[in-house]
Amino acid sequence: MNHSKKYIILIIAALVSHLAAFAQDSLSYYLEQAALYNPRVKASYLEYSAALERAPQAASLPDPSLQFGYFIKPMELLGGNQVADITLMQMFPWFGTLKAAKDEASNMAMAKFENFRDAKNELYFNVKASYYKVYRTIKELDIAEKNLYILHSLEQLTLVKFRTAEKSPVSSSGASNPPGANMPSTGSPKMGSSGNSNQGGMGTGTNSPSTQSSSMGSSGGGMGGAMRGSGNDDMVNLLRLQIEIHELENRIASLKDQLATDKVSFNRFLNRSSTSEIFTGDSLLQAPIPLDILTLADSLRNHPMVKMFEAESEANAARLEMVTRMGYPMLGIGLNYMVIQERAGNTDMMNGKDMTMPMVSLTLPIYRKKYKAMRHEAELLREAAGLSAENVSNDLGVRFQQTLQNIYDADRRVKLYTAQAMLAEQSVQLLITSYSASSTDFVEVLRMQQQLLDFQFKQVEAVVDKNTSIAQVVYLTGNQ
């Protein structure tokens, strides 16, 4: 073997190894791609990032105010003429107001983060469920095509049996032969010596030569009818097979259409072309049932949606504290600077000197209705968020129990239909072998073949249902 052939073999081996590794880890790859490119997850993360920017905004002091006034005609003062007035003022909210505002913004950002987590976890579940659905359709299509091949083989076998029955000599005992052709010889001495008894028989008309010939002729016709009946049975079997073949071909066409739809549904989660190919491998490993699955119910309170409403409740508690302190006065500290122009003839020592005046201001929150309404609003929102968290937790508990039931049911169905499909496949092989030897009813062969197809479909469905239910448990408990 030359070096070029060795090089080609090494490349092929590397490609096969790469494809095998990709087949085992394809779902993980798709999950990574979905997390990177799914629009909903990216939008949720951007919303969380935007919410983080509100904390420094809420913790900042109000902008200071600067006022400037210019006198078109200078105002005469004792110390000169005032030509301009500049005022700078900074307001300070009541103690603790800014901290409460920052806490509210931080908790709302945490709520957005939990919403992002839920979007990502739900995406992972949807990708898994859609992946399993694509696998199921592909596997059912493969099973249907294999069964179609078996039906075509049965069709060829039945066609051979039908043609063999057509070529059999059914007319050799019919009316074309002489009436006595199938009769035994009547001229033997033994027949003549028993003339008295035969005469008695002839008197009754039961053993006359003509009657005997007629009965033998009718017997030959019965054999011909049996042969023709066998041919008719083979023809009926052939028609039954063709009916089943047409139904299975229609099912295969339907599965191909379903596969195209499943691919579009899957690829949208990855935000890629709807016609992109999906690699699922030849077999789907059953996801193991977690050993601590019954204790996972305690993890339902860690679900992102529960955490999101809890964060909203804490945010509204901080908002209540903030609006309460907003009802207290705000303190303002400022500086007033007056520009003084020197006036001629004024001998005062302050003539022409600018003046600086510190200032303090205080707001008077005397309109209490709005502050009362703001506090009431915050209290209602906090209570609503707490009730929403409780409601979500209750719903998760019900869904978790339903999912547990689905897991155990699917696990039982996997074991049942795996064993049933194995037994049915063995039965089909034995029946086909027996039918080829013309000792088995064709209807039984066809019925068992249909049952095998049904068991194989149900076995694939059970594996997919089990994996999907386990993926849902992972999503409900938030343990991605």
Image (cartoon, grey):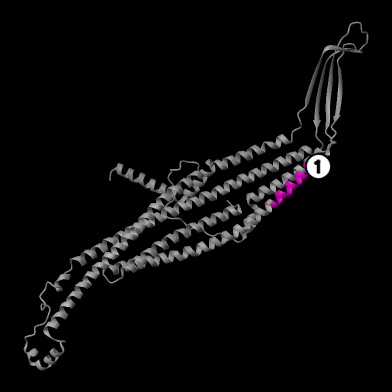
Q: Residue furthest bottom?
A: 196
Residue at (33, 58) in percent of width and height: 245
Is 473 a magenta residue?
A: no
- Magenta stretch, residue numbers: 372-387
The kind of secondary structure the magenta stretch mainly shows is helix
Residue 320 in the image, given as x and y percentages of width and height: 77, 43
The answer to which image quadrant residue 295 occupies is bottom right
Residue at (71, 35) in percent of width and height: 56
| Residue 76 drawn above or below residue 1 | above
- Label 1 sits on a secondary structure element that is helix
Residue at (32, 45) in percent of width and height: 6
Residue 368 in the image, given as x and y percentages of width and height: 83, 39
Q: Nearer the viewer, residue 72 or 299?
A: 72
Q: Residues within 10 Å of mark 1 (few under 14, many from 20)?
A: few
The answer to which image quadrant residue 351 occupies is top right
Of the residues shown, which amino acid type is indicated by label 1? Answer: Lys
Q: Nearer the viewer, residue 477 or 28?
A: 477
Look at the image and tell me whether residue 282 can be seen: no
Residue at (70, 43) in percent of width and height: 107
Residue 15 in the image, given as x and y percentages of width and height: 38, 46
Look at the image and tell me whether residue 344 can be seen: yes
| Residue 297 drawn above or below residue 327 | below
Using residue 40 as the reference point, say whether residue 194 is left or right of it. left
Q: Nearer the viewer, residue 245 or 397?
A: 245
Is 379 a magenta residue?
A: yes
The answer to which image quadrant residue 277 occupies is top left
Q: Residue furthest top?
A: 345
Q: Which residue is mark 1?
A: 372
Residue 435 in the image, given as x and y percentages of width and height: 29, 68
Using residue 446 as the reference point, say whether residue 330 is left or right of it. right
